[in-house]
Image (cartoon, rainbow, N blue to C red):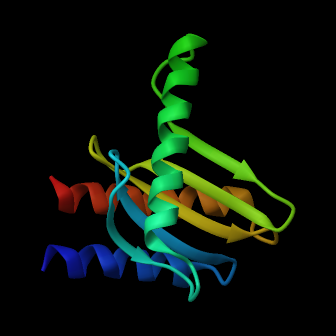
Amino acid sequence: MREDQIKAILTDLNGDSVDIEASALISTDGLIISSALSPGMDEERISTMVGAMLSLGEQTTAELSCGNLEQVMISGAQGYVLIVHAGNDAVLCAIASKAIKLGLLFIDANRAAKAAAAILT
């Protein structure tokens, strides 16, 4: 039941904007909890990369006295990867095309992360 609820949150997130191409909920240890990925995307590779980015982001904010990590965002020529905390033990990763309005990506991803966190607690 819990897994179905999380999957529905991810599917809704992807459906909120045609520019959100994929999403996943990943443990802070880098293990996949649930995903709504595009065909050809490898869950294990994505969860491993997100875990590494999360770890590096946390180390960077600590080392530079920036406080607790809130999000990690990567901008590429073709799109964005946004990672936001979903409670204490998970993060939500959203992958979007370059056409997306960043404000909407932040709002939608944070809303989905809060909804997932509520289910995980």
In the displayed structure, 100 sits above or below 102; it is below
Front residue of 109/32: it is 32
Hey, which quadrant is residue 72 in on the image? top right
Q: Position of residue 109 (x, y in %)?
A: 51, 60
Residue 92, position in %: x, y? 44, 58
Q: Is residue 110 visible?
A: no
> In the orientation shown, which residue stands out farthest toward the right?
77
Q: Is residue 70 left or right of residue 60?
A: left
Observer-nearest of 46 and 84: 46
Q: Does the image show residue 99?
A: yes
Residue nearest the viewer, comparing 88 with 33: 33
Is residue 32 shown above or below 10?
A: above
**Left or right of 121: which side holds 28?**
right
Return the x and y of residue 21 as percentages of the image width and height: 62, 78
Asked which quadrant contains residue 41, the reply is: bottom right
Where, by quadrant of the figure, is residue 39 drawn?
bottom right
Q: Residue at x 51, y 63 (%)?
A: 46
- Residue sitting nearer the eye, 67 or 102: 67
Q: Quadrant of the N terminus?
A: bottom left
Residue drawn at x 37%, y 58% is 26
Residue at 81%, 72% in the rendered image: 99
Q: Residue furthest bottom?
A: 39
Q: Looking at the image, how many numbered discs can be counted on the residues?
A: 0
The x and y percentages for residue 104 are 64, 63
